[in-house]
Amino acid sequence: MIRVGIIGTGKIAETHLKAYAQFGGRCQVVALANLSIDKAAVLRDQFGLDCRLVQDYRELLRGGELDLVSICTPPHLHAEIAVNSLKAGVHVLIEKPMAMSLEECDRMLEAQAASGRLLSVVGQERYVDRNVKLKAVLESGLAGRIVHAQVESYWWRGLSYYDVWWRGTWEKEGGGCTLNHGVHHMDLLQWMMGMPRSVQAVMSNTSHPNSEVEDLSVAVFAYDGGTLAQMTSSVVHHGEERQMIFQGERARVSAPWKVYASREREDGFPVRSPELEEEIELFVSRLEPLKYDGHAGQVDEVLTAIETGSLKVLIDGREGRKTLELITAVYEAAATGERVELPLKPDSRFYTREGFLEAASASPLPGCRGPKTAPLTAPGNSGGES
């Protein structure tokens, strides 16, 4: 039985607990850590848990009572908690984004390598049928070489969303919609297309004066071979219609699922190719559906990796770092107004948290009215809260 601790008992912790509950014969949540014991107790009672409640997560690491932790705190606490957990010999499943900087990611990777424990970064969209099937189609070559990708990470959030003490600040949240909402699709894009050669971007704060960070960004990624991808990250789009469209040389495929194939007439104009569409649809129909969806799919994989001792997962620390590197490059490109080449190097101004914060404060976003004006009633740093 794998003993699990949840660090941070905000909204996302509920999602983790629902996932763990599907595997009651394989794991048991034995502890919740939060600076507000009352808040942790509410979650305990909500799920009917018989578990320990602590304010300081480090108490759990000293006693050798955990095998695995889910880190569900605000992003600025991720690296510290992950490193300490790994050093204590505890496996780690950590919410996205992996950390606040690439330097922190590298410290986490060093701790993981030294500990021999598992480090997995949440990317629940890789465990959703439509996305797995879309990736399989791209890899099959049926659509041909991908020449363009269009990614729309559309969300909508009101002003009160940023009244939470850590949201909307460069120091605690680390960024806006590009980091904390677009991360889902950024992860899918690099999973399906690989890392680009370069990035160009613009961003602004259009609608949230109580936030320091962006609420809209547009990035263009250039790949070897001439392929381009564009991604819009937003919390100002009504309807929150999100999609990924891949234009191949032979066909268009997307999530939500749609396929359209064209072939050329003698004059070069297009005519639809139902035969290729049927071939792609048949390929997709033969793919096995996933047994578990979203967070549950990732939790199942993490538990299996621990049980078998393989410690191999789809999204390990290095995969999590790739996504943050892509996001960091978007911020650097937007802040400098220049094309940013990948991979980013340690001498980049944006490699460290301190450098990132300095650059962010030195380059205020269009539409941003300066430092966040909402109350910052931070409860402290020991246990984490989201």
Image (spheres, rainbow, N blue to C red):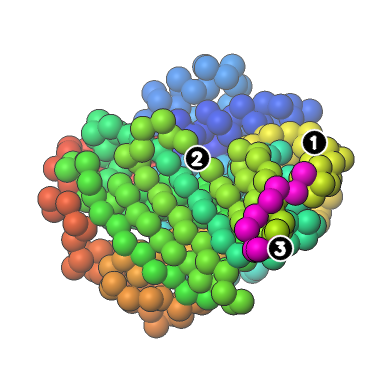
Secondary structure type for disc 1: loop
Residue 273 magenta-drawn?
Answer: yes
The CA distance from mark 1 to mark 2 is: 22 Å
Residue 164 lies in what quarter of the image?
top left
User: Counting other residues with Cα less than 10 Å from the Cα at mark 3, is it few (<14), some (14-19), or many (20 or more)?
Assistant: few
Give x and y (percent) for residue 213: 27, 51
User: Counting other residues with Cα less than 10 Å from the Cα at mark 1, is it few (<14), some (14-19), or many (20 or more)?
Assistant: few
Residue at the (48%, 67%) spot, across then down: 221
Give x and y (percent) for residue 58: 48, 47
Residue at the (57%, 69%) spot, across then down: 227
Q: Please tell me whether residue 127 is drawn above or below residue 203 in the rendered image.
A: above
Foreground mark, 3 or 1?
3
Give x and y (percent) for residue 375: 17, 37
Secondary structure type for disc 2: loop
The quarter of the rendered structure image containing the N terminus is top right
The quarter of the rendered structure image containing the C terminus is top left
Residue 298 lies in what quarter of the image?
top right
